[in-house]
Image (cartoon, rainbow, N blue to C red):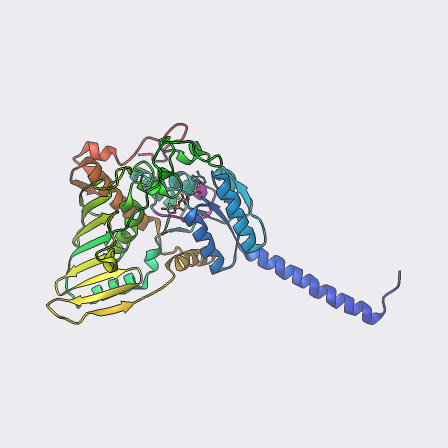
């Protein structure tokens, strides 16, 4: 072998050291990447993952889904994004056991959240969990209790409208008092819901439907209650107020600085859409200490008349009204022909919310979408649906976490789990 001269030797050594330090830097930065897992690789799980990639500094090491097509398509996308294929699982418990996993995004339908959330906490993981907190109120209580038992875990719930500059500006404006006392709020999201085939049929071959139904009842499969459409099915999403309306109920609570309503009533119907099991037309009134908050939705013929206000919050005050939506708000002073003031306040709400979670994981300070706030918003909308389902006005006792004086309504706070699943509430 030809021996190296001194110059060649030092040149090689320097190049080797540089290469080695490059390798170490790459290893360091690889080690510094937050190791994420995703449970539920459907629509929003992948939106959250993309937001995490945009925020930067993450590696998605593992994915879990009960539909093998969703799993492989999501693994392809993640591999393309980060140059490394994540490991894939059907059983979330196996994903939670992946060595080195630091945080998990839970984006399954709500009837799965409680078991997956509590299991992730028990593994010492940080969690970004999608809204609503869970399917039933007692699950929410069990999740809150688990989060309190594991205070070191960082938890963000997916109420990204907490990041909205519009809603934050409205809260500040009301605090300054120019419009006087808040007297009433009206909240609404009207939209034209797309209907799918509701005929019972075999699920797609790639989907383990029994596992998808999980602790909920085993429903006969139809596309109208399958992927993405589960939101308008009573046994899974429990309807538009719980699914989408919860965002604006959460924002309204944030703006008003409110916790839980003391009384709730609701009425509505399936006035037009007959193949869904939740109302397409609903009015619910939530009596908070500050003021009554009225929710309205219509899922058909909805957007034609006043599209500019079909998704938003009206806050009626003594001296004027505010209309607020995700990215803008309007001051409307009292009296005829008063000058309105429009405020534009655009922001990437989902991007900010996921980025705040990742920052919190690094700084170990809890982010803004706390389990307590998610608990209050989820309980609020669930009380709305319980009032609708039992056709009665109900009273909520927040100290006892109980519906007072109505055993039939109180029974709807918890549903029996399908065996062998065990409900996490111990009360
Ligand atoms: N923050 C927001 O604005 C927003 C928007 C949409 C959805 N979401 C929430 O995100 C969650 C998912 O909604 P989506 O619209 O993406 O639904 P989706 O039906 O598109 O996706 C859900 C995925 O979870 C999978 N899944 C079901 N059970 C599972 C299990 N036990 N383990 C692993 N995977 C399982 C399904 O196969 C599917 O791929 C819900 O909680 C929803 O409320 C939030």
The image quadrant that residue 141 belongs to is: top left
- Residue 399 seen: no
Depth check: give the residue in front, 22 or 231: 231
Depth check: give the residue in front, 235 or 57: 235
- Which residue is found at the position 24% from the left and 32% from the top? 411
Q: Say left or right for 182 vs 118.
A: left
6 in relation to 93, above or below:
below
308 in relation to 242, above or below:
below
Q: Say left or right for 163 vs 72.
A: left
The image quadrant that residue 32 belongs to is: bottom right
Residue 53: x and y in percent read 49, 57
Looking at the rendered image, the quarter that the N terminus falls into is: bottom right
Q: Residue furthest top?
A: 419
Q: How many marks?
A: 0
Q: Is residue 125 magenta?
A: yes
Q: Say left or right for 70 vs 252.
A: right
Q: Residue furthest left?
A: 335
416 in relation to 373, above or below:
above
The part of the chain drawn in magenta is 119-131
- Residue 35 seen: yes
Residue 94: x and y in percent read 52, 38
Looking at the rendered image, the quarter that the C terminus falls into is: top left
Ligand 1 quadrant in view = top left
- Which residue is found at the position 23% from the left and 58% from the top? 309
Residue 60: x and y in percent read 52, 51
Depth check: give the residue in front, 370 or 380: 380
Depth check: give the residue in front, 154 or 109: 109
Residue 268: x and y in percent read 19, 42
Q: Is residue 63 magenta?
A: no
């Amino acid at each position: 072998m030809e021996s190296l001269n001194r110059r060649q030797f030092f040149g090689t050594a320097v190049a080797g050291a540089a290469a080695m330090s490059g390798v170490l830097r790459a290893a360091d930065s690889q080690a510094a990447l937050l190791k994420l897992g995703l449970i539920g690789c459907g629509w929003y799980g992948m939106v959250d993952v993309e937001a995490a990639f945009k925020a930067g500094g993450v590696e998605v090491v593992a994915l879990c889904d009960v539909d093998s097509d969703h799993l492989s398509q999501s693994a392809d996308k993640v591999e393309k994004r980060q140059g490394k294929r994540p490991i894939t699982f059907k059983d979330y418990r196996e994903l939670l056991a992946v060595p080195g996993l630091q945080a998990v995004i839970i984006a399954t339908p709500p009837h799965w959240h409680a078991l997956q959330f509590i299991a992730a906490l028990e593994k010492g993981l940080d969690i970004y969990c999608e809204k609503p907190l869970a399917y039933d109120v007692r699950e929410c209580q069990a999740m809150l209790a688990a989060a309190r038992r594991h205070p070191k875990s960082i938890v963000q719930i997916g109420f990204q409208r907490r990041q909205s500059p519009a809603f934050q500006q409205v809260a500040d404006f009301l605090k300054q008092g120019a419009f006087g006392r808040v007297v009433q709020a009206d909240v609404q999201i009207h939209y034209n819901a797309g209907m799918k085939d509701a005929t019972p049929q075999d699920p797609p071959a790639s989907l383990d439907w029994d596992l998808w139904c999980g602790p909920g009842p085993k429903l006969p499969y139809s596309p109208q209650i399958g992927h993405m459409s589960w939101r308008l099915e009573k046994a899974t999403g429990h309807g538009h107020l719980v699914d989408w309306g919860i965002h604006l109920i959460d924002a309204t609570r944030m703006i008003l600085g409110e916790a839980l309503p003391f009384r709730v009533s609701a009425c509505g119907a399936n006035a037009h859409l007959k193949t869904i099991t939740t109302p397409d037309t609903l009015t619910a009134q939530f009596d908070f200490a500050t003021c009554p908050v009225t929710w309205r939705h219509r899922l058909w013929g909805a957007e034609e008349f006043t599209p500019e206000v079909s998704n938003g919050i009206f806050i009626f005050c003594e001296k004027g009204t505010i209309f607020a939506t995700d990215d803008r708000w309007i001051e409307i002073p009292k009296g005829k022909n008063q000058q309105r003031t429009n405020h534009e306040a655009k922001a990437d709400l989902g991007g900010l919310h996921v980025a705040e979670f990742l920052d919190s994981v690094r700084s170990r300070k809890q982010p803004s979408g706390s389990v307590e706030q998610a608990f209050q918003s989820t309980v609020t909308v669930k009380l709305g649906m319980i009032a609708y389902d039992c056709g009665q006005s109900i009273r909520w006792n927040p100290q006892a976490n109980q519906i007072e004086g109505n055993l039939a309504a109180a029974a709807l706070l918890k549903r029996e789990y399908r065996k062998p699943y065990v409900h996490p509430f111990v009360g």
